[in-house]
Image: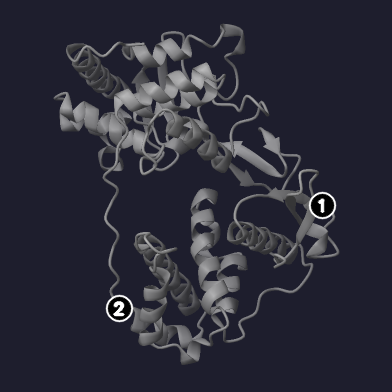
Amino acid sequence: MELKAPGLKTRPRGDGSTAYYWVASAVARDTAGYPLKTVRVHGTDDEVATRCRVLTAELKEWLSKKGIGNRPEYDGTLKSLIRLYQQTKESPYHEVKSNTRAMYDESLNLLETTVGARRLEKVTGIDIKRWHANYKEPASDGKPERLRRAYKAMQLLRIIVGFGVVLNIHECFRLKVVLEQLEFHVPRGRTEQITFAQAQAICNLAIDEGLLSVALAQAFQFELTLRQIDVIGRWEKIEDPQAGGIIDRGQRWRDGLLWSDIDENGILTKDTSKTGQEADHDTMAYPFLRSIIDMVPPERRFGPIIKSETTGLPYRYRHFSDVWRKIATKAGVPKNVWNRDSRAGGITEGSDSGADIEHLRHHANHKNIQTTTRYNRKTLEKTRTVAELRVKNRAAKNVPAT
């Protein structure tokens, strides 16, 4: 069956497979000045179709701001409400970060493709409960229920209905009251974590396979308990292709680690992306991390720290995830353990080593200690204490540092 999606074009490869592309001109005629002309899309059929719909929505938003094309209008359907939420300039959709919008889009596309044609005036609480039940069904026999998928869809439904209230859409006032009467099971938080032995195995294998970038990312995440986005950064759409920074295919890279974040004494100072708090860490306090940092010649220590060996540019999230997963699986790390579990692993190791919980909060830059993290010296002293305890604990277990 031929895959269909807005703006989707295909091209056969020499090996018999098919390459998929989203093409702006296949969506609208007047795309002059739009930074994204053609975008290669990857993944399953659903992922390709979802990506095409997101790119199409972004193009239509850009066109509407330029006064080109039709602005979204409400026609009584859930799909039209979703479009208003995504394409109205004043929508809170445009106030969240690009990676958050990407997560929103997954749920919005699920709602649109399954129940987007439903008229809001006819939707009842029983309908919504049925949607939730359908969304949490296993992907296939033997697989677990997709509780997180269903919960996120319901959260986004609440958000777009709330925006409909702001727009004074009558049906949304009624649905908001209905949704307030419904409760949905909150998925349990993740309990998985990466151990130092696993992080070490990933780093060593990545180095052996010529992927020093992956080893660096893994070491920074585990040792300094940094979020993935604050290590590898993220790419977000830009409207002005002439703007500065690292630009590629109409997107600008931001938020990742730079070599300039580490001073001559090995002190890393960086504003974190989620809360804006400043992270302060002494990289010299972690011998394993330093051993990997020192593999990079001084003359190459400029710009982003984590760059793909293939492209020379900072990783895109999906590409990094795929590369990391292959290395981790080969290193014997179970598939239910993810790269993002590195942060939990580092915090847990610190706790198991006897580190004070307040010091750990400084080390992890949790938002509930914003006041104390303004004092860089005190924060640095605390993160050094955590580092000393963790490394000392490894030595007691006879775990080699490198």
Q: Where 130 sits versus 346, above or below?
A: below
The residue that appears at 44% across and 72% down in the rendered structure is 157
Q: Indicate the position of residue 284 as horizontal and vertical percent values.
A: 36, 11
Q: Where residue 333 sits: x, y (%)?
A: 37, 33
- Residue 241 in sight here: yes
The three-letter amino acid code for the residue at tag 2 is Leu
Q: Position of residue 231 (x, y in %)?
A: 47, 31
Could you tell whether 279 is left or right of 209 in the image? left
Amino acid type shown at disc 1: Gly
The quadrant holding residue 54 is bottom right
State the separation of the CA atoms marked 1 and 2.
46 Å
Query: Which residue is the site of mark 1?
Result: 33
Q: Residues within 10 Å of mark 1 (few under 14, many from 20)?
A: few
Quadrant in the picture for the C terminus: top left
Q: Residue furthest bottom?
A: 122
The residue under the point 39% across, 22% down is: 201
Q: Which mark is residue 182?
A: 2
